[in-house]
Amino acid sequence: MHLFFRVALVLASLCAPAETLRVMTFNVRYPNPGDGANAWSARRDLLVETIRSRQPDVVGTQELFHEQGQFIVEKLPEYAWFGLSRRGNHEDEHMGVFYRKDRLRVVESGDFWLSVTPEKPGSISWNMSLPRMATWAVFEIAGSGKRFRYFNTHFAHRREDERARMNSAKLLACRIELLDAEEAVVLTGDFNAPAGGAVHEALTRLMRDAWTEAAERKGPEDTFHGFTGKPRPGRIDWILFRAPWKAVSAETITDHQGNVFPSDHYPVMTVFEIP
């Protein structure tokens, strides 16, 4: 009889639904007064609806201004967000990280800069025109207590910034290599570099690309469209991971209302299955 119950428990655990984690990366486009018909006020409700409809557990944003972050959590109170701006305050672009409060708990979090002095807020290296940074956290999943480390970033954007992008990738790779090999890691961002290129390879030697690993893919591969709905060649918005997880699906989200788009980038979301 005891053997029967032990076998039943094992079978029940095998048949239990796998835990999932929904991860999104989203360059939200800063509130530029020169955007005209694509101004933040014209697209913010659609951006909120895009997030609401997909229900990601965590969203790594780029170009986020504080007012945008506050608007999003006002409309989506099930989320909270954190992160400093690239100047080390709240007066510029943030790599703001949003998370569902009922699904995830922040164990610890912080920020560092993509420079030779990463702990110095606002620091600039490698001839970049602006500070670049990463916001990170250790999350604990409600119920299971499983943890993962999360990084969100935005690399330099100019054509002449290839060296800076490569050095930024190396800095992130170094930080990841220093972590416990068993720790699950997720990295999201706008890398301003094409998947398959040297910058991408500097990171995928340590991590897997969720888009290429996904069992199911939906939407275009390329992600920047400049409010036209016609993406330029190059997948520059990535979700990378180092974990014994399965990328069940990946979607480049093309939601729009007429000529109004949530941003000049398409958000990308991956659903992970966690054993």
Image (cartoon, rainbow, N blue to C red):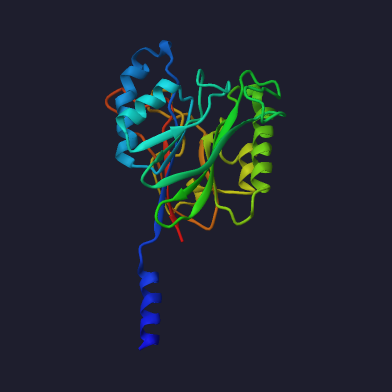
Residue 208 appears left or right of 104: right
Q: How many marks?
A: 0
Q: Nearer the viewer, residue 16 or 104?
A: 104
The residue lying at 59 percent from left, 29 percent from top is 133
Residue 75 appears left or right of 131: left
Task: Quarter of the image for the N terminus: give it.
Answer: bottom left
Seen in the picture, residue 14 relative to 235 is either above or below; the reply is below
Residue 194 seen in the current view? no
Percent from the top left, x then y, of residue 127? Answer: 70, 20
Seen in the picture, residue 73 relative to 67 is either above or below; the reply is below
Residue 163 seen in the current view? yes
Residue 170 appears left or right of 48: right
The residue lying at 46 percent from left, 25 percent from top is 64
The residue lying at 65 percent from left, 25 percent from top is 161
- Residue ranking furthest to the front: 107
- Residue ranking furthest to the bottom: 1
Percent from the top left, x then y, of residue 214? Answer: 46, 51
Residue 68, quarter of the rendered image? top left
Percent from the top left, x then y, of residue 9? Answer: 38, 76
Q: Nearer the viewer, residue 150 or 250?
A: 150
Seen in the picture, residue 162 relative to 14 is either above or below; the reply is above
Residue 92 appears left or right of 22: right
Percent from the top left, x then y, of residue 12? Answer: 35, 72
Seen in the picture, residue 71 relative to 207 is either above or below; the reply is above
Q: Nearer the viewer, residue 193 or 230?
A: 193
Residue 259, quarter of the rendered image? top left
The residue lying at 45 percent from left, 39 percent from top is 221
